[in-house]
Amino acid sequence: MKVTIEYVEQLVKEVRGLNKLDLRDIVFFEDGKKLDIPSEVLASFEFTGLNNIDFVSSGFYKLKK
């Protein structure tokens, strides 16, 4: 697989940008539909030590509180 340094740098820049945002300020969409993530789920995630990307990649956003 050929991977350019520029591509990796762009991905890192995007991830860092997403992780700098306050999680409560992000409006998440899935399959074109806005997700209604309960504030309790956001609050539960706040002290996990994980970042915004982890919120999605771990599936934490799918929890129902």
Image: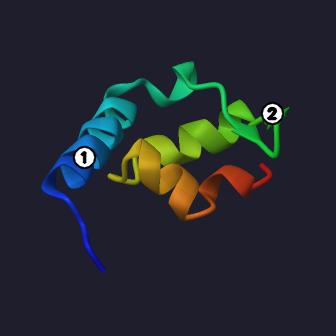
Q: Position of residue 25 (x, y in %)?
A: 54, 19
Q: How is the image coloured?
A: rainbow
Tag shown at residue 12:
1
| Image quadrant where one finds the N terminus | bottom left
Residue type indicated by callout 1: Val
Give 16 or 40, whichever is nearer the viewer: 16
Residue type indicated by callout 2: Asp
Q: Quadrant of residue 17?
A: top left
Tag shown at residue 36:
2
Which residue is at the far front? Answer: 2
Instruction: Tell me if residue 36 comes above or below residue 41 in the rendering.
Output: above
Residue at image coords 34%, 37%: 14
Mark 1, secondary structure of its residue: helix
Horizontally, residue 54 falls left or right of residue 16, namely right
Instruction: Tell me if residue 55 comes above or below residue 3 in the rendering.
Output: above
Looking at the image, do the residues carrying marks 1 and 2 touch, with CB atoms under 8 Å apart? Answer: no
Horizontally, residue 14 falls left or right of residue 46, namely left
Horizontally, residue 7 falls left or right of residue 40, namely left
Q: Position of residue 61 (x, y in %)?
A: 66, 50
Q: Position of residue 27 (x, y in %)?
A: 65, 25
Which residue is at the far bottom? Answer: 1
Instruction: Tell me if residue 36 comes above or below residue 31 in the rendering.
Output: above
